[in-house]
Image (cartoon, rainbow, N blue to C red):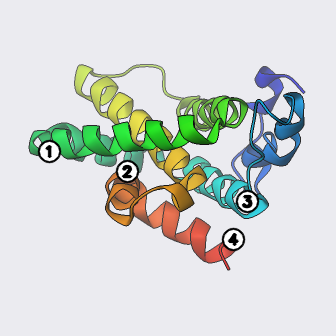
Amino acid sequence: MTLASASSFPPSPNGRAASLVRRPRVAHLSPPDAEQAVAPASAECVDAFLDQLVELPLIQWLVIGAALVAARDRVPVRQRAWDELEAALVSRRLGVAIWSVRDAVDTAAHIVTRETHQWSRQQRGAFAAAHGAAEGAALAVLARDDLPPETYRALTAPFATCVAVAESTHRG
């Protein structure tokens, strides 16, 4: 399946977009000493979060992004949380899984915006902010067990509803 054919899938509750990327298989692409395997529960939770992103209407992405752009006072908190996330991801050596999650977030963003042809400057900025926050949230879900709770909350807050649904479905 190609990325172009993947974007032709309509959003659906059965998880078609997220099922394009299966993290348990990507762990085998690298030698065992180069990559640590992603726990199946983490991969399932990330998949469920990605499904929620695809189902989220574009207007919600724009509302989330506009709120992020307006909350300039929270930039240092988000930057500190991002730094802690990067450190956790590097220490776990999850390079292929990180790439896979980022690619899946990009695919979700493409699916959500595929019928939008003209953007205002404010919409472009808001969507870019939301897209970045979605990537941070997805990676935080992937590395949840290695993050302090306040860092996890800071990274997932913009998409808290999507994360909550994903966690309620796939965390024991």
**Image coordinates for residue 2, horizontal then vertical, percent:** 85, 22
Q: CA distance from mark 4 to mark 3?
A: 6 Å
Q: CA distance from mark 2 to mark 3?
A: 19 Å
The C terminus lies in quadrant: bottom right
Q: Earlier in the sequence, mark 1 or mark 4?
A: 1
Question: Do tag 1 and tag 4 residues touch (Cβ < 8 Å)?
Answer: no
Disc 3 or disc 1, which is closer to the eye? 3
**Residue underneath mark 4:** 170
- What amino acid type should be assigned to the residue bearing mark 2? Leu
Q: Is residue 93 left or right of residue 75?
A: right
Q: Earlier in the sequence, mark 2 or mark 1?
A: 1
Is 144 above or below relative to 82? below
Question: Along the line of sight, which residue is nearer the eye, 161 or 32?
Answer: 32
Q: Earlier in the sequence, mark 3 or mark 1?
A: 3
The N terminus lies in quadrant: top right
Question: Do tag 4 and tag 3 residues touch (Cβ < 8 Å)?
Answer: yes
Residue at (56%, 39%) from the top-left corner? 91
**Residue underneath mark 3:** 44
Disc 2 or disc 1, which is closer to the eye? 2
- What amino acid type should be assigned to the residue bearing mark 1? Ala
Q: CA distance from mark 2 to mark 4?
A: 19 Å
**Residue underneath mark 2:** 155
Q: Which mark is residue 71?
A: 1
